Image: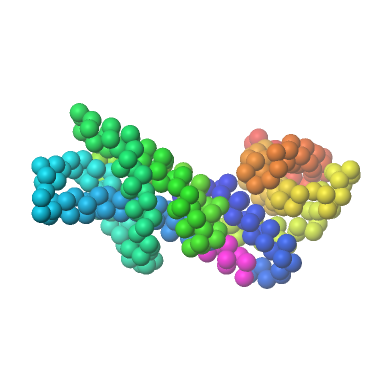
Amino acid sequence: MINRRHIRVKVMQSVYAMITSKADDIVKEEKFLKHSIKKLLDLYVLQLQVLVEVQKLAKQKIEVSKKKHLATKEDLHPNTRFIDNQVIVNIANSQSVSLYIEKHKLTNWDLDDEYIKIVWQKLEKSNLYKFYMNANETSFKNDKDFVSDFFKEFIAPENKLAEYYEDQTISWLDDIPFVNTWVVRTLSKVKKDKTISLGRLYKDEDDEQFVSDLFRKVMLHHTSFEEDISSKTPNWEAERIADIDMILIKMAICEFLHFPSIPVRVTINEYIEISKDYSTNKSGYFINGVLDKISKEYEKDKRLHKIGRGLL
């Protein structure tokens, strides 16, 4: 499920694209924005499926070994703990996941299975895998802990996968960290007797509407927002403020003025956090200072109309 912070990041990227390219088709860019958010679910399912495909590959290798002309005792009676892992089997048996793959034609790992082999080869040689396969106790908890570590250590940080995803959909490069966190959260919630199902992409209709409202209002009013920014940064010409910082400040101003249910402090904190990943080291301090001045000025001039107690 996408959260408000990642929605803000996706909107920021679209605003940046429109302003820097001097494009003026808001409807077209909004469609692209919403499409890129929908594609998050594709990436999420593909990352889950890496687990399933690696297990499938391990199973195939066991079957091949059993058919060797001079099969060893180990070949004929292999350790099946990994291919029986209950959490991965749960994902493999999920009708919700299977239907999504079929509907959206996510045949990536059938066509590009070399990435699955890369992950499997690294996993098979690891101490994590050896300890898991040779552990005295077998339990759902052990399976769950192993899969979580497997994902975090061998799938999430795999550069070859990241490069592959970027080639598939350019916006995915920035989405990978968010989606990986989403997968880890999903794995932590898997139940023994309940097959996982794909939840909704947005928490609710308000979050989905927030995408359109924030994007449109920033684009429609960003020029007037720049005037307010200039008045609070007299020692800085607009050209000297980093492009991303300027956009983040404009988005925050938009929330101050046009989103009455979002507390001022929440808005400021959100954009400070986003700046840590997308701008310079000092951007957080700069953005905080500018937004603090602007919000106090708006409050003094009675331009802030927040609904609910304590929202200022």
Quadrant of the image for the C terminus? top right
Q: Quadrant of residue 262?
A: top right
**69 or 156: nearer the viewer:** 69
Which secondary structure type mostly characterizes the magenta part of the structure? Answer: helix
* Residue 34 seen: yes
The residue located at (68%, 45%) in the rendering is 279
Query: What sort of colour scheme is used for the picture?
Result: rainbow
Residue 263 versus residue 200 in the image, above or below? above
Say whether residue 243 is left or right of residue 129.
Answer: right
The residue located at (22%, 46%) in the rendering is 83
Say whether residue 287 is left or right of residue 6.
Answer: right
The residue most toward the top is 136
The residue located at (26%, 53%) in the rendering is 56
Q: Quadrant of residue 281?
A: top right
Whether the magenta-drawn stretch holds residue 98 is answered as no
Task: Please report the bounds of the magenta region as a residue range.
Answer: 28-35
Number of labels in the image equals: 0
Where does residue 39 sit, x and y in percent of width and height? 48, 60
* Residue 199 seen: no
The residue located at (47%, 58%) in the rendering is 164
Where does residue 309 sit, x and y in percent of width and height? 64, 36
